[in-house]
Amino acid sequence: MHFYDLKYLIMVLISIDVVMVITCVLLMRKIRLMPKTEIFQRGVKIYESLLSDADKVVREFHKDVRVKQDLIRQLNTQLDKRIAGLNIIIQRADVLLGYEAASGTETGNRSGSALSRRKEIFDLTKKGCKAEEIANRLLIPKGEVKLLIDLNKKRKSA
């Protein structure tokens, strides 16, 4: 590389630096001479657009939260109804089991039929029939069959 080329490069770099300094000075002077309200208004416009966008997002989020809350309320209502139904079935089963255990024998048509039905369910369970099959054979609800089988298992394990 020649000495002449190096001088040329240094001159180009110095001229670029001078142009950059002059540009910065001019920009600073323009900003200083600009009315303060104009700068403030530009900043306000930028922040207003940001705030309006954020407000839209918050409204959408709030709607989504309301929808989720309504769904949770509906689910809670449905679960409460199901729990109440299950409690009624459990109370009925407890009453039947308590009545049959207290009487020890078949003392009436209802308790006799319940006792014979219960024996049939247990016999079919011992033969390996599933709850759905037993319910179809005896024409009783599958839930009742499952409940009696589960209660019998619990009674035997206790």
Image: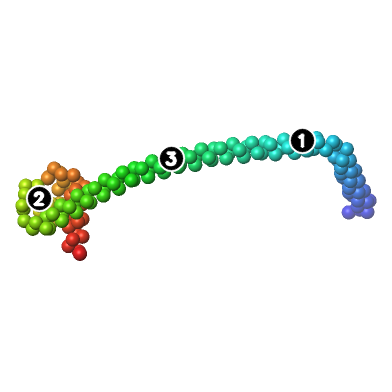
Q: Is residue 75 left or right of residue 137?
A: right
Between marks 3 and 2, how big is the CA–CA gap? 45 Å
- Location of residue 39 (image quadrant): top right
Tell me what residue is drawn at x 48 percent, y 40 percent: 66
Q: Quadrant of the C terminus?
A: bottom left
Gap in angstroms between the C-alphas marked 1 and 3:
43 Å
Q: List the residue tagged with mark 1.
A: 41
Location of mark 3 (residue): 70
* Distance between mark 1 and mark 2 Cα atoms: 88 Å
Judged from the image, the secondary structure of the residue bearing numbered disc 3 is helix
Q: Earlier in the sequence, mark 1 or mark 2?
A: 1
Q: Which quadrant of the figure contains the N terminus?
A: bottom right
> Where is residue 73 drawn, in percent x and y?
40, 42
| Identity of the residue drawn at 89% across and 46% down | 21
Q: Which amino acid type corresponds to the residue marked 1 in the rendered image?
A: Gln
Q: Secondary structure at mark 2?
A: helix
Q: Position of residue 89 (x, y in %)?
A: 22, 48
In the picture of the structure, the residue carrying the numbered disc 2 is 111
Nearer the N terminus, badge 3 or badge 2?
A: 3
Residue sitting at 93 percent across and 51 percent down? 7
Look at discs 1 and 3 and give the one toward the viewer.
3
Mark 3–mark 2 CB contact (< 8 Å): no
Task: Reply above or below: 111 against 38.
Answer: below
On the rendered structure, is 143 left or right of 28?
left
User: Given the image, on which type of amino acid does mark 2 rest?
Assistant: Ser
